[in-house]
Image: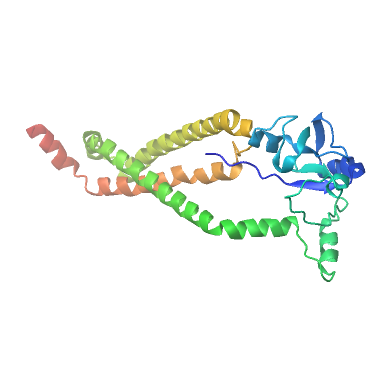
Amino acid sequence: LFSQLQLQALAIPRAAHPVILHRVGNRLTAGRLPRNDRAEMALHERIARSHGWRLGDTVDGGFRLVGLLEGPTLLGLVSLEFVTSDRFPFGLTLQAHALVLPRPGQRRAVNRYLARQPGLSLYTYERARGLIERNTRGTVLVLQAIAAFLFLLAAVIFAIVYRVFLEDRQDELAVLAALGLPFSQIMRRLLSEAGVIGVSAWLLGAALGVAGLAVLQAGVFAPRGLAIPVAARGPLLLSGLLPVLALLATWVTVRGVLRHLDPVALIDQRRKD
């Protein structure tokens, strides 16, 4: 049901492992770094949890997991000395890359410099993000269309339910109108009630949604090394459109009800009944 994080291991000279970890913001939290004469690997703990691996297990490629890493960068480390030796197992395809770690604040300048070098295929964060966005553009558009439809559907349902609520208050509205209360004031009163209900429902729904995501993160995703945004600001702010759309739909409904409201005829009908 849930995806596993992709295993990507960098074969780097053993002496450079601490330097790489420091530059990418990671640190060793359990075990040790791999030795240069054995099929060993240090792996980010989220990737390990995603696959159900523990220290001492044999991971993909026949490497033994000897260290767990923690930090913002998901990677694995193996010894370049081992994979270039005669003891390296067959069946794995190696790809040679130049790993460039610019100094803080120099990433764009380094990227521009490397882009001007002939024969280089530069793979940067910006390029990776662009590829992901292009590959997922269709899926994102479909999800956005579904979200827009659900927003409109929720607003219409809210207006319909409020319309039923107004039908039960016809007598009250007729009395208010017969007492000389302007329709504009009646509308403001009804819209205020609908606004309070809509905002309260939105706050309750947002709180329940965040709580549900927190439970999923703690009980389902986190044990598998995965992470979801529990209280992302963007979706929460976007969901704030729901009470606004519901209020607009309710305004149309209330306007239609008040336009056809005849307090004299309604009071006479109630007397006859």
In depth, the one of 131 and 160 nearer the eye is 131
The mark tally for this picture is 0
In depth, the one of 159 and 39 nearer the eye is 39
Q: Quadrant of residue 162?
A: top left
Q: Residue furthest bottom?
A: 118
Q: Is residue 209 above or below residue 126?
A: above
Q: Is residue 152 above or below residue 163?
A: below
Q: Is residue 135 above or below residue 161?
A: below
Where does residue 193 sit, x and y in percent of width and height? 38, 36
In depth, the one of 239 and 210 nearer the eye is 210
Q: Residue at x 84, y 41 (%)?
A: 21
User: Which quadrant is the C terminus positioned in?
Assistant: top left
Q: Is residue 220 visible?
A: yes
Q: Residue at x 69, y 35 (%)?
A: 48
Where does residue 82 sit, x and y in percent of width and height? 86, 44
Where does residue 258 sit, x and y in percent of width and height? 26, 45
Q: Quadrant of residue 188?
A: top left
Q: Quadrant of residue 130?
A: bottom right
